Image (cartoon, helix red, strand yellow):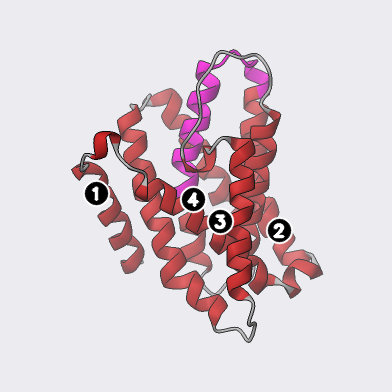
Amino acid sequence: MTYIVLILSVLIGIVIVYGLKPSTKTVQLLLAFSGAYLLSITILHLLPEVYISNSTTIGLYILLGLLLQLILDFFSKGAEHGHIHFQESSTFPWALFISLSLHAFMEGIPLANNHHHDHLLWAIVIHKIPIAIILGTFFVRSSIPKAAAILFLVLFSLMSPLGSFAGENIPFLITYKTQITAIIIGIFLHISTIILFETAKDHKFNLLKFTAILIGMLVAYLA
């Protein structure tokens, strides 16, 4: 069931692109909601889980996650938190593909045998939908062959399920589950805080975005 939900989250985003053709403003509100939800789940559920372990280096792994996401951002150009520069190009974006796939694979690993499985699963799903919308829009506006775009999106939808499968079956990942979860926490903190705290144009207060953030935090708290 977990695998199906993760795959569907990407497919839903693609259907929204082709069926509803959402505006940039709508996508930004979805991102704000997903960022608030992701940050809240990380703070309310994932952080307490890793800090009840006996490890004294959890903070270092969280920092490692932050640094790792900074590196991934360099190659993905910030696609994980909604930044894709639309351009006419027929060249397949390998750097984007590899960085997003690695990110999706890693965020699926902690789903295996996690006490807060449902909270983390829905945080990933809610995060993936607007990202899939942005990716879908990117391919619609680019001149990349349709077959290549479909292959990209299908493979991307499989990465988190593969990460979850690996987390359940690879001994190394099972043994160091707490440390890996801490790394993912760092990644989530980086992504969610950038989404939430980016400065609006001309430093104007955005009531709609603020409302979306409040709703995201409330839903996470009540979940």
Q: Is residue 139 magenta?
A: yes
Q: Residues within 10 Å of mark 3 (few under 14, many from 20)?
A: many
Q: On the rendered structure, is 17 left or right of 3?
A: left
- Under mark 2, the amino acid is Phe
> Dot 1 lies on which element?
helix
Above or below, 93 against 161 in this view is above
The residue at the point 43 percent across, 57 percent down is 38
* Left or right: 100 as drawn, with respect to 9: right
Q: From the viewer's perspective, is residue 215 above or below residue 87?
A: below
Of mark 2 and mark 3, the one earlier in the sequence is 2
C-alpha span from label 2 to label 4? 24 Å
Label at residue 191: 4
Q: CA distance from mark 1 to mark 2?
A: 36 Å
Mark 3 vs 4: CB contact within 8 A: yes
Q: Read off the magenta span.
A: 127-148
For residue 167, above or below residue 115: above
Determine which residue is flagged by label 1.
210
Quarter assignment of residue 44:
bottom left
Label 3, label 4: how many angstroms apart (C-alpha)? Answer: 6 Å
